[in-house]
Image (spheres, rainbow, N blue to C red):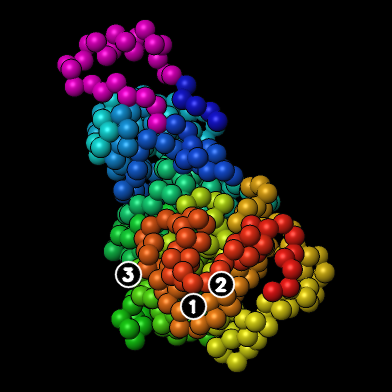
Amino acid sequence: MSRYAPVVPAALLALALTACTGTAVEGTPGGSGAGDPYFPHAGNGGYDVTHYGLTLSYTPGTRQLTGRAAITARATQDLSAFDLDLRGLTVGQVTVDGTAARWNRAGQELTVRPRDGLAEGRTFRVAVRYSGTPATITDPDGSQEGWLPTDDGALALGQPVGSMAWYPGNHHPSDKAAYDITVTVPRGLRAVSNGELRAERTTGGRTTATWRTRRPMASYLATLAIGRYDVTRTVTPRGLPVHTAVDPAEAAASRAVLARVPEVLAWAEDLFGPYPFASAGAIVERPGDAGYALETQNRPVFPGAPDTGLLVHELAHQWYGNSVTPASWRDMWLNEGFATYAEWLWTEEHGGDTAQQVFDQLYAGTRYAVPAENEAVWSFPPANPPDAAHVSGRPVYDRGAMVLHRVRRTLADETAFRALLRGWSAAHRHANASTADFTAYVERRAPGKDFDEVWKEWLYGEGRPRQP
Ligand SMILES: [Zn+2]
């Protein structure tokens, strides 16, 4: 961990403190990580962000991003300094509550030292001006995230740590916040982000769009899609606005599946509880623009037209992952296990294989055509990936879903299982949850049942558990 490196010699600092009028706080640095077991530098200590105001301008031709991030946060300790995460880019100026602050950079840590310390409980506003060409980040598992240039613009994806490539912040899922994102792009292009579109206007050669996300959002779920899009704005029969942006090259292939968004959402609401956000939608880019789909808040991103199963998966994440967000990257199976199980439930209720049949195929090693894919299901326990390269590994998805199926079978009561799905999304709505929270929740809901084998063998056990 690159702990805080002082900007000014201690002797000078002491002088500065004695020169103050008595309001200064003698705090300590907030720390350069949020304590994540896999991404120790992700996030920071000592404060909690409540709001990000991002004002951005991007020119695809030169790949130049100019930005101002105004971050409202509350100090959770007496702070002499605090870190923001930012990869690459050039920082021009940093202010805290309108006053220029000292800052320095080391790796992805942007350390800010306010002129006066910040007392625990104090709400403060840090503003960062920055510019440059945002980086594409290659993850430990080889996938690419961060800022992905496309033929007609760019796409920002942030799981797990890519959002620090385009704005400074507390980039760990445990610190969720509201957002206002304003983006200016060349005329003829559009900027699509999370939340609701508040305004879009063209003056001169530039178009500016303003997006608002009121519900808390983890930074890995923030997105920005810049390019040419066919935009469709509708309202579901239940009154939820749906805003989709589709690359014209994918429009024909996407039409039928995106028309099912209201149907999938209604099905999911009946199963998982009220939809957690104020709008829904999708962003469809070209197949080569990203290597995977991502459940970016309100508006999942798909590289190419999705099939119904993938749409169900990413929409289910709006409940499981986006509203109930993992406490750390170790808890990813709470995202992927639920979203995968949502696919199984959809198939089961729409004339396809039952969840039991899918479970049996996985257990027998016949689910995938490639033997290695079937074997990968048993490569590690879903609740304990071996390292950062495996937080999105096969067991996190398939065996995570198998854990939920084992919970369902152990309950042996469909009504109780459905109540559990709804109850879990309600219990941690717009918050964070860990695996320990989940197991404790299940045991509380069904005190007469024995889940020991499910936890010990399916959730935490190495290798393939014995036949249930
Ligand atoms: Zn997923």
| Residue range highlighted in magenta | 6-30
- Would you call the spot at circle 3 few (<14 residues within 10 Å), some (14-19), or many (20 or more)? some
Considering every residue shown, the one lying at the far left of the view is: 21
Asked if 271 appears above or below 133 in the picture, the reply is: below
Q: Quadrant of residue 130?
A: top left
Asked if 124 appears above or below 25 in the picture, the reply is: below
Disc number for residue 278: 3
Task: Judge from the rendering whether residue 358 lies leftward or rightward of residue 133; answer left or right.
Answer: right
Name the quadrant of the C terminus. Answer: bottom right
Name the quadrant of the N terminus. Answer: top right
Could you tell me the amino acid type at mark 2? Answer: Val
Residue 240, given in percent of the width and then of the height, sits at 33, 77
Under tag 1, what secondary structure? helix
Query: In this figure, which residue is indicated by the disc labeled 1?
Result: 417
Depth check: give the residue in front, 263 or 303: 263
Query: In this figure, which residue is indicated by the disc labeled 2?
Result: 407
The residues tagged by marks 1 and 3 sit, at their Cα atoms, a distance apart of 27 Å
Is 124 one of the magenta-colored residues? no
How many numbered circles are shown? 3
Label 2 beta carbon less than 8 Å to ligand 1: no
